[in-house]
Amino acid sequence: MMLELAPGDRPVLPRGVRVVDDRVRGGKVLLGPEKAVALDAIGDAILSRVDGTASFAEIIADLAATYSAPEAQIAQDVQRFLVGLRARMFLAVRA
């Protein structure tokens, strides 16, 4: 299985995975079955746009517009982040 996302792929958090507030340490945490990942502000910004309806290209365009950053750099960084989550089963993709 290829882990990289294509522009038309629609990333989604699979059943049992969600982003929650960590009231003890502050910030956000990505929770999955028997595992958790602390999110920094960048991870939270990316995952706040992962809703199963927005395509990878739409997420990139929105982040680039929001942060006034080059789309090519945003795409590279987001791709790396999402591939890492997908490899650990924190992310699924709808084509």
Image (cartoon, rainbow, N blue to C red):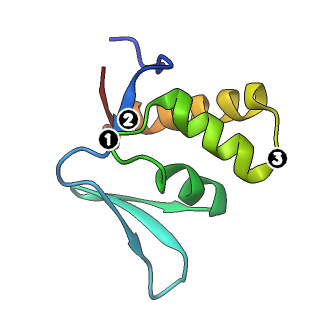
Which residue position holds label 1? 52
Calculate the distance from the C-alpha at mark 2 to the C-alpha at mark 1.
5 Å
User: Looking at the picture, how far across and down is residue 55, in whole percent?
Assistant: 44, 31
What is the three-letter code of the residue carrying label 3?
Ser
User: Looking at the picture, how far across and down is residue 65, in whole percent?
Assistant: 73, 45
Q: Residue furthest bottom?
A: 24
Q: Earlier in the sequence, mark 2 or mark 3?
A: 2
Q: Earlier in the sequence, mark 1 or mark 3?
A: 1
For the residue carrying disc 1, how many other residues have a C-alpha within 10 Å: few (<14), some (14-19), or many (20+)?
some
What is the three-letter code of the residue carrying label 1?
Gly
Question: Disc 2 on helix, strand or loop?
Answer: strand
Identify which residue is drawn at 66% across, 45% down.
63
Q: Are marks 2 and 1 in contact (CB under 8 Å)?
A: yes
What is the three-letter code of the residue carrying label 2?
Pro
Question: Disc 3 on helix, strand or loop?
Answer: loop
Identify which residue is drawn at 37% across, 31% down.
10
Which residue position holds label 3? 68
Q: Are marks 1 and 3 in contact (CB under 8 Å)?
A: no
- In the picture, the quarter occupied by the N terminus is top left
Q: Quadrant of residue 37?
A: bottom left
Would residue 78 be found to the left or right of residue 83 on screen?
right
Q: Nearer the viewer, residue 15 or 84?
A: 15
Q: Quadrant of residue 34?
A: bottom left
Q: Earlier in the sequence, mark 2 or mark 1?
A: 2
- In the picture, the quarter occupied by the C terminus is top left
